[in-house]
Amino acid sequence: MPERIPTHAAIIVDGNRRWARARGLPVSLGHKAGFERLKEIARYVMGEAGVKVLSLYVFSTENFSRDAKEVAYLMDLFANNFRSIIGEMNERDCKVVFSGRRAGLAPRVLDAMDTITEATKANATGTVNFCLNYGARAELADAARALAEEVRRGALAPDAIDEAAVEAHLYHALPPVDLLIRTSGEQRISNFLLWQCAYAEFYFTPVLFPDFTPADFDAALAEYARRDRRMGGNSTR
């Protein structure tokens, strides 16, 4: 394992549909395989790899424009599987949180989200952040709206709005992303954690997510350890 490990790693989970189509399978089976891989990767990243925070982009606000049957299957997948990982999250002392808008999500999904959030809220060793119905522009708009409301109520002066104030109104108080991984060969961040990724190292791999193994994550860690993270200042080496 490299000496330098990211505190916060984020993964854009991409390639489930292409994985299924390449095998002549229904798209739903690609999503099912992807969720099984997601559980394995989360287990590894938060355990052996030693990462403290893992953010997973599992469903964007824009994904609601997909075929209604596919969206419904994904919602069922989330609702049926979030409860299944509660025991493991508690064993690893990992808290589960969700980033994204609740509006538009089915009650069964919200119930599963609330159940795992409540069951793991006291855990303190690590955090798994599922970004579901998430968009970074939406997060920043929501933060701006909350700040404006505080100004309207007289609880906050406009000239007191600084970077710290914005961060305090994001969905969760998480450390900045150190390493952003996108699977499937696409090389864009697709409206994901724009504020948090200001100085993240990006790693793009052609591996489709259902095929993304712990060894592939280790390759990303090795590349991260080779990077010179100056963050606008002097070399870190």
Image (cartoon, helix red, strand yellow):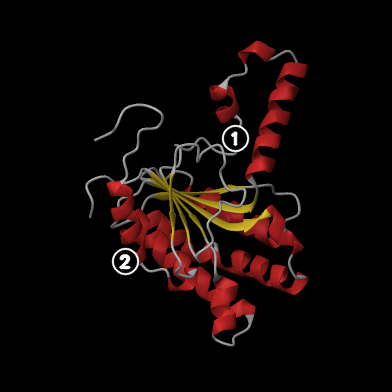
Residue at coordinates 32% horizontally, 56% vertically from top-left? 47
Q: In the image, which disc is placed on residue 170?
A: 1
Q: Label 2: which residue?
A: 215
The quadrant where residue 27 appears? bottom right
Q: Relative to 230, is 79 above or below?
A: below
| Residue 137 picture location, percent across and down | 67, 41
- 98 in relation to 20, above or below: above
Q: Nearer the viewer, residue 18 or 6?
A: 18
Query: Would residue 31 be visible to someone looking at this image?
Result: no
Mark 2–mark 1 CB contact (< 8 Å): no
What residue is drawn where x is 35% and y is 33%? 230
Q: Nearer the viewer, residue 131 or 221?
A: 221
Callout 2 amino acid: Ala
- SS class of the residue under badge 2? helix
Q: Secondary structure at mark 1?
A: loop
**Circle 2 or circle 1, nearest the eye:** 2
Residue 3 spot, x, y in % from top left: 22, 47
226 sits left or right of 46 in the view: left
Crowding around mark 2 (Cα neighbors within 10 Å: few <14, some 14 to 19, many 20+) is: few
- The mark that comes first in sequence, 2 or 1, is 1
In this view, the residue in front, 10 or 229, is 229
